[in-house]
């Protein structure tokens, strides 16, 4: 939703001359939204015009607004490039955040249709459940009070750009490639999430393995980073929202019929099947 904080952020940025023309933001937001809803890739925006990270977040917010207008509800945020594995895979270094809606949510054990996806990949993640609205940057000493659960999770990403290639600004404008996600059973927030080994399985075979420490050395650091980035770009994270902490391993391409599962030591598993 264009909350007050988001509106205030966007209008401040426009006043300071920090953003490209509102019409350009709206046009790029419409293009990326259409690419996502039709499942047809678009050329990287940055190849046609240079734009800044702040502009990229304004395009993301405007494209999400189009989804909210169609009835989708914000139910969480996602962090990206919080692991070396992902930064190396995509060739980018800065952390990013995106928005998750109810239309992206897949029930644990449910199915994912490839219809309207372009070149989807899946990656293993850890998810946090927010129990108190986050509207400012949190300190490490207080973050535990804002989270009531932790779970194993999978994120399905699908760049709307051709060949899954993008600059940092491109991927931010594309809502950080968010397409779908699956969350396993919630565990008490006091459950340790450090040093947990995890595996990504496709059709029963391990295709990636790693540890939860790959996420910023400590997945809780990703919650802090989410509070910082969301606040910086005008997004309140409401109570009840999920925070996806970012992939611990590189992502793998999804094929029709695949049965996908993540197993995280002590947190259990989460999975889905791709329909043909
Ligand atoms: C961008 C999204 C990155 C993560 O967990 O690091 C991300 C991409 O790789 O397309 O979701
Ligand atoms: Mg991810």
Image (cartoon, grey):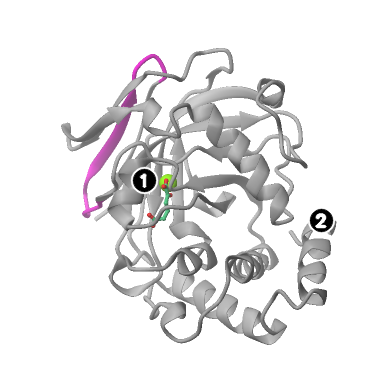
Q: Residue at x 64, y 49 (%)?
A: 229
| Separation of marks 2 and 1 at Cα, in angstroms | 35 Å
Mark 2 vs mark 1: give the one in front: 2
Quarter of the image with the N terminus in it? bottom right
As drawn, the label of residue 111 is 1
Q: Is residue 258 magenta?
A: yes
Q: Is residue 274 magenta?
A: no
Q: Circle 1 — which element?
A: strand
Percent of width and height locating residue 251: 29, 47
Instruction: For residue 99, say whether it is visible.
Output: yes
Q: Circle 2 — which element?
A: helix
Q: Residue at x 66, y 70 (%)?
A: 62
**Mark 1 CB within 8 Å of ligand 2:** no
Percent of width and height locating residue 21: 69, 85
- Judge whether 55 appears above or below 198 on screen: below
Give, as a single range, the part of the protein colored magenta: 253-267
Left or right of 200, for residue 15: right
As drawn, the label of residue 65 is none
Percent of width and height locating residue 16: 79, 74
Quarter of the image with the C terminus in it? bottom left
Instruction: For residue 199, say whether it is visible.
Output: no
Which is nearer the eye, 6 or 71? 6
- What residue did someone put label 2 on? 5
Picture quadrant of residue 243 = top right
Which is nearer the eye, 106 or 194? 194
- Judge whether 202 appears above or below 194 on screen: below
């Amino acid at each position: 939703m264009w909350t007050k904080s988001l509106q205030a952020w966007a209008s401040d940025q426009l006043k300071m001359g920090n953003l490209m023309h509102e019409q350009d933001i709206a046009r790029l937001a419409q293009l990326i939204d259409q690419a996502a809803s039709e499942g047809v890739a678009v050329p990287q925006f940055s190849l046609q015009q240079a734009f800044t990270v702040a502009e990229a977040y304004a395009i993301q917010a405007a494209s999400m607004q189009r989804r909210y207008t169609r009835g989708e509800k914000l139910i969480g945020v996602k962090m990206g490039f919080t692991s070396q594995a992902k930064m190396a895979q995509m060739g980018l270094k800065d952390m990013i955040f995106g928005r998750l809606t109810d239309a992206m949510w897949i029930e644990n054990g449910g199915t994912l249709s490839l219809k309207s996806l372009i070149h989807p990949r899946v990656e293993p993640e850890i998810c946090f459940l927010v129990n108190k609205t986050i509207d400012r940057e949190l300190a490490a000493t207080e973050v535990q009070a804002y989270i009531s659960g932790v779970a194993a999770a999978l994120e399905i990403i699908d760049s709307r750009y051709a060949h899954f290639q993008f600059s940092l600004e491109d991927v931010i404008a594309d809502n950080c490639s968010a397409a779908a996600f699956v969350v396993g059973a919630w565990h008490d927030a006091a459950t340790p999430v450090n040093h947990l080994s995890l595996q990504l399985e496709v059709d029963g075979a391990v295709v990636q393995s790693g540890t939860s420490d790959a996420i910023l050395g400590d997945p809780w650091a990703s919650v802090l980073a989410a509070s910082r980035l969301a606040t910086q770009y005008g997004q309140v994270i409401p109570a009840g929202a999920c925070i996806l902490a970012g992939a611990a391993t590189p992502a793998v391409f999804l094929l029709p019929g695949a049965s996908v599962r993540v197993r995280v030591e002590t947190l259990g598993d989460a999975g889905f099947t791709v329909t043909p």
